[in-house]
Amino acid sequence: MDAYLFIDFGSTFTKLTLVDAYEDNVIATEKSHTTVNNDVAEGYEKALRMLRKKVGKAFNIKKKLACSSAAGGLKIISIGLVPELTAEAAKRAALGAGAKVIKTYSFQLNHCEMEEVKNSDANIILLAGGTDGGNSKSIIHNAKMIAKHKISIPIVVGGNKSCTDEVKEIFGKDIEYYITENVMPKLNTINIDPAREIIRKIFMNNITHVPGMNEVEEKISQVIMPTPAAVLRATEVLSKGSLRESGLGDLAVVDIGGATTDIHSAAEGYPIKSSVLLKGLQEPFMKRTVEGDLGLRYSAKSLYEGSGSLLLKKYLNDKKYNLDEEIDKRYKNVDIVPENEDERYFDEAIAKVCVDISMERHVGKIESLYSPTGMIFYQEGKDLQNLSYLLGTGGVLVNSYNPKNILEVGLNKEENSMILKPRNSKFLLDKEYILSAMGLLSTIDEEKAVRMMKKYIVEI
């Protein structure tokens, strides 16, 4: 039996998905705790042994591909000029590469900010600023500050191309840097794919810093992308389809984790009404947002502190809990698994808060302004009101008795709302936890990936 093996090195679990090389079937899945602090090879080998035992017969692995978010995944600092423009464009490029943006800076950096950058745990800095032929003062100033403070992590330069030669001269041989195309070459026009590809390559080169990853890489074909990038790719392929296999059309993926809640949307998001004008930075068809303060475990405390008790109580439907105690228990014991109905119910209430707030932050909004000719309406961000599908993934959804009940919170049921959440989407569930594996499979066989997602992702 010939098969493909797809590995997802997560911060908590290493997940294996074995796929038949010729039939559109998942042969088996297995997982084991990621042993990131000691040797990731241990967790991988344990999961592989359990997988072989589960399959119960010999199989030939034609190709092994992996994605990884082990050791916290890929962390990026983005630096731009104007917060709403080049800084935001840089942030989107980082998010599109599967990174978590831990800080965004704008304008000319000061020494205090540079110390923050130097003492952070970022893996990459994305340096942008100015349209092509536009402002050059800020990006040159910030390049000089990076050189002066001897920043030792890779710098991806995606700003005003007129400054490229001077930036190269400033960095010289002391700074590791990569020049790519401007993330915002023209006002309100983004160009994030080149920067995204450079970031992905740097991630691949540096993933071996995780203990044991060198040993694992000798046994597999390649670690090719961060896990969020694999999910984003799967989302895009499922939406657009392939040459001979139709996709599902507009959709969004809600990925609820212990530390973050990620939203991936595949949709143009143009205004539905002709009377509404677009405002701000151009939105990409594939958009990813990461909410680092919304999660079930690592971010439970920040979620509670940020949203307050009222929203959580709303989703608990007046069931009595000691909120402080329950939140603290999850924050301090990130591996905790619900053992009874009460614990599951509380987890699902937290998940609803995650879906509610993260969807509101992801979608666009309508602003109304008075003018001499009457009221004018502006849309900033994506209009997802007519979104066809909302697809859920993540342990809390997969293990829920009623995942639809959690995803429904992402819809907008209010009339005439200025928040452009989906209104009548159908609900899908990644029941077999295959999205990241399908993102990897799409790099080998796009059509097979589309067919398998349409087969295994279920409507709820």
Image (cartoon, rainbow, N blue to C red):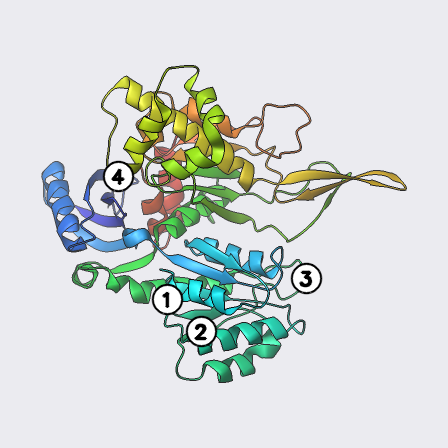
Secondary-structure class at tag 1: helix
- Kindly give the residue lying farthest to the right in the view shown: 372
**Res. 341 image quadrant:** top left
Q: Earlier in the sequence, mark 2 or mark 3?
A: 2
Above or below residue 398? Residue 210 is: below
Q: Which residue is mark 3?
A: 187
Category of crowding for the residue at label 2, using alpha-carbon neighbours closer than 10 angstroms: few (below 14), some (14–19), many (at least 20): some
Q: Three-letter amino acid code at disc 1?
A: Ile
Which of 422 and 444 lies nearest the eye of the viewer?
422
Q: Which residue is mark 2?
A: 178
Q: Is 429 positioned to the left or the right of 416 in the image?
A: left
Residue 396, numbered circle: none
Which of 102 and 405 lies nearest the eye of the viewer?
102
What residue sits 55% from the left and 82% below the top? 166
Q: Which residue is mark 1?
A: 202
Residue 309 percent location from the top left of the image? 45, 26
Q: Earlier in the sequence, mark 1 or mark 3?
A: 3
Q: Three-letter amino acid code at disc 3?
A: Leu
Alpha-carbon distance for marks 4 and 2? 39 Å
Q: Which residue is mark 4?
A: 26
What residue sits 40% from the left and 64% below the top? 124
Alpha-carbon distance for marks 1 and 3? 28 Å
Alpha-carbon distance for marks 2 and 3? 23 Å
Q: Nearer the viewer, mark 3 or mark 4?
A: 3
Contact between labelled residues 3 and 2, with CB atoms less than 8 Å apart: no
Secondary-structure class at tag 2: strand
